[in-house]
Image (cartoon, grey):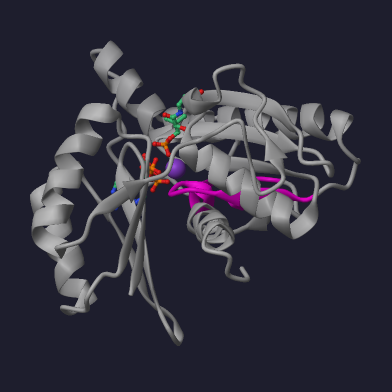
Amino acid sequence: MKLFLDIGNTAMKWRSRGVTGVEGGGWAHGRDWQPLVQRLAEQLGGGQVSELWVASVAGLEADQDLAQVLQQRLLARPQFYYSSAADAGVRNAYSEPERLGVDRWLAMIEVHGRHGEAVVIDCGSAMTVDAVTRAGEHLGGYIVPGVQMLRDSLFKGTARVRVTENVAPSVQLGRSTSACVEHGLRAMSVGFVEFAIGRCRAQLSAECPVYLTGGDAEWLRDSLPGGLLHDPDLVLDGFERVIAARNGEAP
Ligand SMILES: Nc1ncnc2c1ncn2[C@@H]1O[C@H](COP(=O)(O)OP(=O)(O)O)[C@@H](O)[C@H]1O
Ligand SMILES: CC(C)(COP(=O)(O)O)[C@@H](O)C(=O)NCCC(=O)O
Ligand SMILES: [K+]
């Protein structure tokens, strides 16, 4: 089977595809490759990996370590795919295209393939925004800390700010430390996302599709305006799209 891995800064997402279609998928959080790959191998149930594709933003050293573990445990040569100047009809806005996170690149390729023009908001370890035009031009985007990174920085940078209880989703003024943090982080995220959508739609059509993806999309989506599309699989879908095209297969 073909195995696709999306390696972010917190989580590894995977999908296996056999001749009859998708056979499995999942995710795991962590950076210790041995146990992560061991669990993946168990979930693959011993199936032979004919092609192993990896899209990683973990950095070159981590990629080298991961490649070794994958080769040893899955007996397949990992092929790393990185952002480029152009692929699948999308042209990268970066003058150094390989510096664009490959998760952002593949998600954009996917939404462009589905709709032409679109905005992608990935609520991951970092929160990213990207806009692509109908003609496939990447207009650029934003990178800001994800909500967990924001929480961690508050806890790290203060003596007494802690979240010590469950807080229901709200952007109302908080009346405890926990509520001030959680409502504040939500308000900050909503404010940023609404601003970003406005900026992107000013350069695209006013009703262009806006996608939410990433581990924290569920946490945020109920506080955002209606009509946003939530799809956790954009990166893997985009990955399959580019590899299928490379292999001359229909997406
Ligand atoms: N089980 C979990 N373990 C760690 N983080 C999680 C988990 N579930 C959701 N998250 C949230 O998802 C974020 C990571 O986003 P995700 O898109 O899954 O990974 P990545 O940024 O590695 O692509 C974390 O920062 C955290 O806020
Ligand atoms: C911005 C990111 C860290 C987001 O990755 P994630 O939050 O999914 O781990 C990743 O896309 C990345 O490492 N980008 C490289 C820098 C750039 O895109 O400009
Ligand atoms: K990601």
Residue 140, by quadrant, is top right
Residue 228 higher or lower than 177, as above or below: below
Residue at x-position 72% and y-position 50% = 112
Label total for image: 0
Is residue 60 inside the magenta stretch? Answer: no
User: Is residue 169 visible from the viewing direction of this image?
Assistant: no
Where is residue 195? Give x, y as percent: 73, 27
Whereabouts is ligand 2, in terms of quadrant? top left
Residue 171, by quadrant, is top right
Where is residue 96? Give x, y as percent: 54, 18
Where is residue 10? Give x, y as percent: 30, 41
Residue at x-position 16% and y-position 68% = 41
User: Is residue 84 visible from the viewing direction of this image?
Assistant: yes
Residue 242 higher or lower than 30, as above or below: below
* 203, 237: nearer the viewer: 237
Residue at x-position 41% and y-position 30% = 176
Q: Which quarter of the rendered picture does the N terminus lie within? A: bottom left
Is residue 110 toward the left or the right of residue 179 in the image?
Answer: right
Question: Which residue lies most toward the front here?
Answer: 248
Where is residue 109? Give x, y as percent: 63, 48
Is residue 223 inside the magenta stretch? Answer: yes
Is residue 35 toward the left or the right of residue 28 in the image?
Answer: left
Q: Which residues are magenta?
A: 209-224
Q: Which quarter of the rendered picture does the C terminus lie within? A: bottom right
Residue at x-position 20% and y-position 28% = 61
* 163, 119: nearer the viewer: 119
